[in-house]
Image (cartoon, helix red, strand yellow):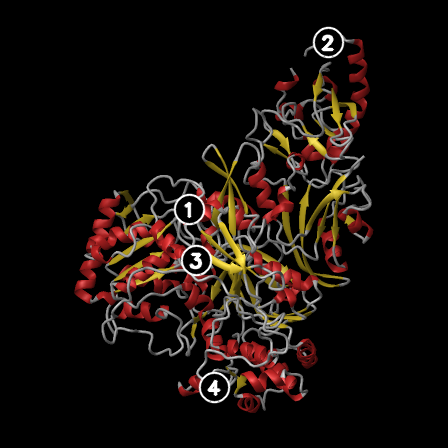
């Protein structure tokens, strides 16, 4: 199984914001929102010296995505297919899920309720509700440009990056550039309370990484998220049970 | 049904289980692709790729392709065929479609039936706009002479208007890109090396890079930054002189937190050290330079100790910088800079940079200054203007760049001396934000008999127009032809030609500058002198010299490539001929000395910061091209205002916190119109504050950009005029911070 991931090399990044803007154009993202973003950090003192760097952020396509569990949409059985081997796998999913073959977290906007629970659940604030879609809006976020990948293209942010600071690939493939970066010390933005396996990594010198971690790594899981996960865990078995009873068939 | 559950209702609902109505449905899906009515299609789906775009969100002019769906441009990308920017473009380049479709854009010719500065617009026909403009310009030229019309141009579309107005007999043309930006650099290098350097310094292959107040990374020029990053990747040592921990400083090996205005002293001390330690390129100096002994003599007093005191930096740092440059010679990039009009003493500073490059032998070698050879293009335009005797206002400044110093034009406008200037024409330039002493610019605009402005967007200057003309944007017109070479000089030598071609059809009544000028010319009695019928003809004439045409370029995806020549001299060559009087690099410039200026680079102290004030420094943002992009909704989102950098210790004493809203007032009592947020940081000296330039437009027709952030130009009431070049130094103002209506003293 693949786990797509991205490494952002802060040694190269010059903070030009092209990634954030290219994504807006590619995916018709509302002007005041972002599937990805760039925050300018510092100059600030760090134990390793004065630092100034950037936080180019996007969906982390986490190993344990907090956003997936809280989705209240009706579960359906979804058939996934590995684009390489053709292997199929079916899973019970709500309107958002983690793909079993490439590790990306995706949204089915047609089934999304626009409730925003997932956006509130994400400690990285990588999701937003696009109010222009549907009656109540639809959740949206970075897809790792899987649609572009399928067409043989790079993710839009990677393509436009003049610094070649955004490296995309399969973290599970030890020969990939991203895996090599991880071997060389590319970090996850994780804290004691937020450990959900982000698959976007950051590479840089000590002072820049210190500044990034200190200023931007989330320190708490959103409360809404904890509450909803709990509720979801209680309700999910109930839902499954009801479904087995085939009392309702509203499809 | 669950599908009708709204966000509001969901958040109100107590039980999640109640909301989850089970559906025994199977969603058939392949891989992780999700398609559906709400999924955005992406720029690659059902689009046509249109080639031939050349960007003008800034003036580096990267080559573009457009993705067009249903006649609408949905995305811009770097042209993969480009050997310069390649597939990459910057944030501004990516945001070009938001300029194209900005609802606030100028659409029709307008006539101001209100007041200048508080306009009331009446839509008029092109016929009427051109008739009236021609009539008024002609009447002014007839009464006061052709030189009574002044032009403030900027950008590729202003070339043809510039040539036209010059042809009609006015030398009073002032380009901000020269007089408020890089003119002094070009002139100082001309008088040293005999050619303007551009930014052609081979950072990609340097062993050491010296940046003097440069905003690389904060001003994004794609191929230039690729060179810079390649150099760093290859292990070049980076030295940055800046009062601020800039984007470049954050990547530097040595950050010199130099006192503003003292760079020349620093450069002199570095040269002293190089000469006294014998670490200079003796062969290059002997074979290709003149005036070394005069230079050496001029540096007698310029010891590292002397400079350390002046520059407020440790002496050891000066030695460290000099020694690093010395061991790296000749593969050293002494960056010539771009915006170099700082203190009105800039010619001497830039001469010092040029001399430093020369004694390091950093010319025509990897890492050094290089002279890219582009392909030759043809030309056909308005003939040379014949100026009336004594109408040239620029003679006072012997090394002035092309055109006339801005201040000379404004003063003539205001005083009528030595002769009156009665019409101002702005073409793509926003003089309200480019020229220092805004109040005086506005006074001049109120005084003239006629103001004609052509632009793409409403700007500060358009508020002062009598007639306002809407121009096609760079995505809807032909005009510029770019030539150049591959971005990395060490790669296989190649040359390219790329002509700007429209990616989409123009909308409303926007026109290109050749059409506008030709129509104006017909009405001003120059019908028989019109050099080209259309912009397409103009471009084709330019291309014909290179045996190309628009049609041919279209078949080549917008870019013609051919083999080029390496910009490096054969290894070992140290003797070169330059286009100076002596044919050598002039470390001592006789021409400069003959005009009663120092023939060797000379440090001239700038005014000290008065007690209670901080020096106002300004610079660039990577997502804005000055005021031009302030209304771009995507770019505005990335940087809606310009935080004021205040030193953390200073802020602590003043009780300022990150995010506090403040205004500024300068030494002359000029106040900022708007407020901005404070950014408290150890990354700036205590004696200075810093803002990005171009914010705070006063035009209410900009529904996004109006009044956002502080317009630094409103605070630049005092400026130094460089005596050699007439360019305006603008880092000469001092400010206090206003918080909650109270003016706060800046602690020393």
Q: Is residue B502 left or right of residue B745?
A: left
Q: Is residue B188 above or below residue B94?
A: below
Going from N to C along the chain, the mark reached first, 1 or 3, is 3
Label 4, residues with CA under 10 Å away: few <14, some 14-19, many ≥20: many
Q: Is residue B284 above or below residue B414?
A: below
On what subunit does the disc labeled 2 rest?
A
Q: Which of the labelled discs sits on residue B599, or is there none?
A: 4
**Is the N terminus of chain B in the top left, top right, bottom left or bottom right quadrant?**
top right
Q: Nearer the viewer, mark 2 or mark 4?
A: 4
Q: Nearer the viewer, mark 3 or mark 4?
A: 3
Label 1, residues with CA under 10 Å away: few <14, some 14-19, many ≥20: few
Residue B690 x, y percent position in the rendering? 55, 63
Find the distance from the CA under tag 3 to the CA under tag 4. Answer: 41 Å
Q: Nearer the viewer, mark 2 or mark 1?
A: 1
Going from N to C along the chain, the mark reached first, 3 or 4, is 3
Q: Which residue is mark 2?
A: A248
| Residue in the foreground of this view, choosing between B644 and B105 | B105
Q: Is residue B217 left or right of residue B741?
A: right
Find the distance from the CA under tag 2 to the CA under tag 3. Answer: 75 Å
Residue A125 x, y percent position in the rendering? 68, 40
Q: Is any atom of residue A157 visible in this view?
A: yes
Going from N to C along the chain, the mark reached first, 4 or 1, is 1
Q: Which residue is mark 1?
A: B551
- Determine whether label 3 and label 4 are within 8 Å by CB: no
Q: Which residue is mark 3?
A: B546
Tell if the residue under mark 2 belongs to the same chain as the one under mark 4. no
Residue B552 x, y percent position in the rendering? 44, 48
Secondary structure at badge 3 equals: loop
Q: Is residue B149 left or right of residue B625?
A: left
């Amino acid at each position: 199984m693949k786990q797509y991931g991205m490494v952002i090399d802060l040694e190269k990044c010059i903070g030009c914001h092209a990634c954030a803007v290219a994504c807006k154009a590619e995916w018709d993202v509302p002007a005041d929102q972002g599937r990805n973003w760039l925050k300018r950090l510092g100059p600030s003192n760090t134990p390793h010296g004065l630092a100034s760097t950037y936080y180019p952020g996007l969906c982390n396509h986490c190993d344990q995505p907090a956003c997936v569990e809280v989705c209240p949409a009706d579960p359906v059985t979804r058939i996934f297919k590995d684009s390489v081997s053709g292997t199929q796998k079916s899973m019970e999913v709500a309107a958002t899920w983690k793909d079993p073959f490439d590790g990306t977290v995706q949204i089915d906007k047609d089934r999304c309720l626009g409730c925003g629970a997932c956006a509130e659940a994400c400690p990285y604030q990588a999701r937003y509700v696009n109010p222009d879609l549907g009656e109540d809006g639809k959740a949206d976020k970075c897809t790792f440009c899987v649609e572009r990948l399928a067409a043989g293209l790079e993710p839009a942010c990677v393509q436009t990056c003049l610094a070649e600071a955004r490296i995309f690939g399969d973290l599970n493939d030890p020969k990939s550039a991203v895996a090599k970066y991880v071997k060389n010390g590319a970090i996850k933005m994780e804290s004691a309370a937020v450990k959900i396996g982000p698959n976007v990594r950051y590479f840089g010198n000590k002072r820049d990484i210190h500044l990034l971690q200190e200023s931007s790594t989330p320190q708490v899981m959103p409360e809404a998220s904890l509450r909803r996960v709990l509720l979801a865990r209680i309700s999910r078995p109930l839902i499954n049970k009801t479904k087995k009873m085939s009392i309702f068939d509203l499809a | 049904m669950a599908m009708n559950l709204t966000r509001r209702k969901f958040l109100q609902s107590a039980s999640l289980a109640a909301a989850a109505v089970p559906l025994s449905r199977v969603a058939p899906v392949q891989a992780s692709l999700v398609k559906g009515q709400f999924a955005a299609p992406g720029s690659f789906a059902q689009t046509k790729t249109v080639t031939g775009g050349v960007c003008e969100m800034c003036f580096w002019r990267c080559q573009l392709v457009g993705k067009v769906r249903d006649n609408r441009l949905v995305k811009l990308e770097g042209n993969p065929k480009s050997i310069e920017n390649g597939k990459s473009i910057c944030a501004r380049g990516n945001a070009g479609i938001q300029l194209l479709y900005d609802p606030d854009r100028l659409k029709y010719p307008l006539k101001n039936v209100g007041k200048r500065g508080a306009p009331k617009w009446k839509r008029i026909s092109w016929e009427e706009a051109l008739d009236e403009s021609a009539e008024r310009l002609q009447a002014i030229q007839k009464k006061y002479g052709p030189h009574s019309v002044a032009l403030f141009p900027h950008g590729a579309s202003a070339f043809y208007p510039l040539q036209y107005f010059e042809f009609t007999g006015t030398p009073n043309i002032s380009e901000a890109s020269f007089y408020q930006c890089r003119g002094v650099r070009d002139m100082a290098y001309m008088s040293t090396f005999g050619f303007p350097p551009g930014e052609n310094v081979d950072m990609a292959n340097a062993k050491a890079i010296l940046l003097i107040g440069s905003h690389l990374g904060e001003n994004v020029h794609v191929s230039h930054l690729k060179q810079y990053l390649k150099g760093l990747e290859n292990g070049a040592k980076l030295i940055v002189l800046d009062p601020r921990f800039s984007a470049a400083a954050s990547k530097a090996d040595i950050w010199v937190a130099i006192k503003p205005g003292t760079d020349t002293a620093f450069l002199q001390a570095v040269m002293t050290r190089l000469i006294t330690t014998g670490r200079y390129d003796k062969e290059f100096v002997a074979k290709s330079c003149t005036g070394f002994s005069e230079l050496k003599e001029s540096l007698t007093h310029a010891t590292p100790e002397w400079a350390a005191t002046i520059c407020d930096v440790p002496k050891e740092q000066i030695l460290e910088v000099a020694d690093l440059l010395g061991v790296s010679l000749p593969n050293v990039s002494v960056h010539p800079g771009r915006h170099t009009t700082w203190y009105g003493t800039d010619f001497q500073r830039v001469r010092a940079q040029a001399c430093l490059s020369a004694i390091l032998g950093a010319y025509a070698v990897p890492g050094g200054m290089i002279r890219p050879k582009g392909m030759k293009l043809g030309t056909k335009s308005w003939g040379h203007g014949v100026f009336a005797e004594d109408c040239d206002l620029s003679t006072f400044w012997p090394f002035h760049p092309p055109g006339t110093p801005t201040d000379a034009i404004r003063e003539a406008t205001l005083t009528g001396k030595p002769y009156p200037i009665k019409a101002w024409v702005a073409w793509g330039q926003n003089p309200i934000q480019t020229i220092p002493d805004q109040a005086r610019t506005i006074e001049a605009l109120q005084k003239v008999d006629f103001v004609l402005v052509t632009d793409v967007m409403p700007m500060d200057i358009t508020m002062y127009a009598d007639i306002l003309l809407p121009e096609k944007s760079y995505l809807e017109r032909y005009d510029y032809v770019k030539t150049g070479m591959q971005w990395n000089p060490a790669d296989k030598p190649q040359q390219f030609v790329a002509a700007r071609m429209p990616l989409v059809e123009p909308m409303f009544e926007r026109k290109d500058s050749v059409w506008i000028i030709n129509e104006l010319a017909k009405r001003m009695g120059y019908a028989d002198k019109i050099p080209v019928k259309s912009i397409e003809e103009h471009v084709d004439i330019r291309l014909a010299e290179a045996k190309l045409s628009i049609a041919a370029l279209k078949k080549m995806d917008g870019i013609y490539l051919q083999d080029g020549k390496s910009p490096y001299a054969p290894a070992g060559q140290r003797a070169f001929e330059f286009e100076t009087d002596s044919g050598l690099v002039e470390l001592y410039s006789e021409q400069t000395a003959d005009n009663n200026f120092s023939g060797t680079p000379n440090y001239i102290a700038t005014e000290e910061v008065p007690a209670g004030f901080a020096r106002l420094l300004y610079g660039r943002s990577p997502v804005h091209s000055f005021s031009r992009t302030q209304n771009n909704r995507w770019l505005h989102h990335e940087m809606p205002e310009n935080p004021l950098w205040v030193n953390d210790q200073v802020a602590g004493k003043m009780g300022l916190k990150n995010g506090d809203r403040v205004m500024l007032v300068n030494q002359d009592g000029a106040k900022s119109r708007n407020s901005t947020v404070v950014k408290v940081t150890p990354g700036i000296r205590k004696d200075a504050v810093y803002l990005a330039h171009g914010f705070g437009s006063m035009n209410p027709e900009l529904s996004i950009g109006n009044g956002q952030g502080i317009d630094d130009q409103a605070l630049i009431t005092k400026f130094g005029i460089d005596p050699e070049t007439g360019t305006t130094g603008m880092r000469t103002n001092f400010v206090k911070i206003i918080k909650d209506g109270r003016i706060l003293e800046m602690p020393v």
